[in-house]
Image (spheres, coloured by chain):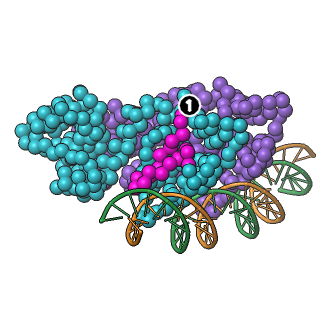
Chain colours: A purple, B cyan, C green, D orange
Amino acid sequence: MLTRYLEEQGYRVTGVADGQAMREFLRDTVVDIILLDLVLPGEDGLGLARWVRSLSDVPIMMLTGRDDVIDRIVGLEIGADDYIAKPFHLREVLARLKTVLRRRQPPTSSNRAEDRDVFRFEGWVLDLGRRQLLTSDGLEVVLTTGEFDMLVALAKHPGRVFSREVLMDLTHGRTLEAFDRTIDAQIARLRKKIEQDVKRPMLIKSVRGIGYVFTGKPII
Amino acid sequence: MLTRYLEEQGYRVTGVADGQAMREFLRDTVVDIILLDLVLPGEDGLGLARWVRSLSDVPIMMLTGRDDVIDRIVGLEIGADDYIAKPFHLREVLARLKTVLRRRQPPTSSNRAEDRDVFRFEGWVLDLGRRQLLTSDGLEVVLTTGEFDMLVALAKHPGRVFSREVLMDLTHGRTLEAFDRTIDAQIARLRKKIEQDVKRPMLIKSVRGIGYVFTGKPII
DNA sequence: GCGAGATTGTGACGGACTGTAACATGGGGA
DNA sequence: TCCCCATGTTACAGTCCGTCACAATCTCGC
């Protein structure tokens, strides 16, 4: 019911059945917010929230029984952003969700490095505002839109290994299909433009079975 | 039953009858983990956990009734590391116990050195950010993804002996199957690239019956 | 709308990496 | 000393990934 309602309101929603399914889903996908029912089959919702918190800052909204005061307290202590007591009105969920997302916007985006205008690494200058990449000689390397977006996604988090699923979400906003070589092809084209030796890349390395990682050293 | 099972698995276990006995025992002995039944004669398990927490950081695993949701929440709030609902399988207890012990290891042992970016040993430079290994001459030794991950896992803790189970968990995130020679093969390939004399390895030594240990001398 | 050129997705091919199994080697206990 | 079993070593096959060509799609000026 909740899933359908939020989809009608224009949100992209994925519902999962239990904690295990959620862990698997989050391994490959970036989400903007998590709505978490504390009463789950098999696993404890608070434990799940803790697990999420140990990995990321993604907003969590908890659904609790009306009288679970302790749940709420512990939940907020763990780092949940809001809770709603059951039974709830769909419109109330939507309103609170908007609030949480709005509140979260500044902290995550102005979270420094994350949303800066210019990234520098090993002589390169990646200018998000002008959408251009300069070499150490000040020469522009002309990148296509797709190549640029891919480089930005990777360079924002040096050392973090991205799965193809996540890269697809970040650069195309859609999910990866089976046997989809889109990401690989784009990486190959990007490498051809920015790597000295394409056979031994220094900026974007492959992690077999997982995806890719940006290995350029950022200059602060 | 639980005591006997864990002893058979090679653990040193002491079972005590109640809270008073536990307090006395802990006054004289250092333990690695406490398994605590929340339903105790005479004393409240949560109070005991609180008492332990006020004195030490030793991991606590709680055994609770299936529906004691509040107990679990308060337990986690107090600082318990995990809980298992009764009735439980002995093997599940063992698995969780291993996980808790492993998770607890880093914070106590390697106060952060854990997350350093560059490891140096005997002239070698292992750069986690760039995912590359350099010899004392500054030449890169090209490692595959699997070889690199394996070396990182070992080199993060020189002198610590890793079982194959733990190495599989660290490098592949999965559990070891019976007759699984994956780790051995990977170690062999890694040695071929980094050991001067593969017959007499100086950096990664085998520990018969256990696993492998990194014996390179770290330079701080 | 239309069309040329740029960009990107798709599938095929081949090389690289790795799990698996088979065989070789060697250490330790009976 | 001999035997058992853990480990070293290697070959091979399955899978993953780099690369390329080509078609589909997009962009932009008209």
Question: Tag 1, which secondary structure?
Answer: loop
Q: Position of residue C6 (x, y in %)?
A: 84, 48
Please name whichever residue, D6 or A107, is drawn nearer the observer in this view of the structure: D6
Q: Position of residue A176 (x, y in %)?
A: 60, 56
Please name whichever residue, A191 or B112, is drawn nearer the observer in this view of the structure: B112
Mark 1 residue crowding within 10 angstroms, few (<14) / some (14–19) / many (20+): few
Numbered disc total: 1
Q: Is residue B25 left or right of residue B217?
A: left
Task: Inspect the image, locate mark 1, and give the three-letter code of the amino acid beneath it.
Answer: Ile
Q: Chain of mark 1?
A: B
Please name whichever residue, A116 or B160, is drawn nearer the observer in this view of the structure: B160
| Residue B124 placement: quadrant | top right
Q: In percent of the image, x 24 and y 31: which residue is there?
A: B53
Residue B215 falls within the magenta-colored stretch: yes
Residue B39 falls within the magenta-colored stretch: no
- For the question of whether residue B112 can be seen, the reply is yes
Q: Is residue B200 left or right of residue B56?
A: right
Q: Position of residue B100 (x, y in %)?
A: 34, 44
Q: In percent of the image, x 61 and y 48: which residue is there?
A: B195
Quarter placement of the N terminus of chain B = bottom left
Q: Looking at the picture, does residue A128 appear above or below residue A186?
A: above
Q: Looking at the picture, does residue B76 appear above or below residue A186?
A: above
Q: Is residue B65 left or right of residue B172?
A: left
Q: In percent of the image, x 18 and y 44: which residue is there?
A: B14
- Per the image, the residue denoted by label 1 is B219
Residue farthest left in this picture:
B42
**Image: magenta residue range:** B201-218
Q: In percent of the image, x 46 and y 40: which residue is there?
A: B159
Please name whichever residue, B202 or B88, is drawn nearer the observer in this view of the structure: B202
Q: Position of residue C23 (x, y in %)?
A: 54, 73
Quarter placement of the C terminus of chain B = top right
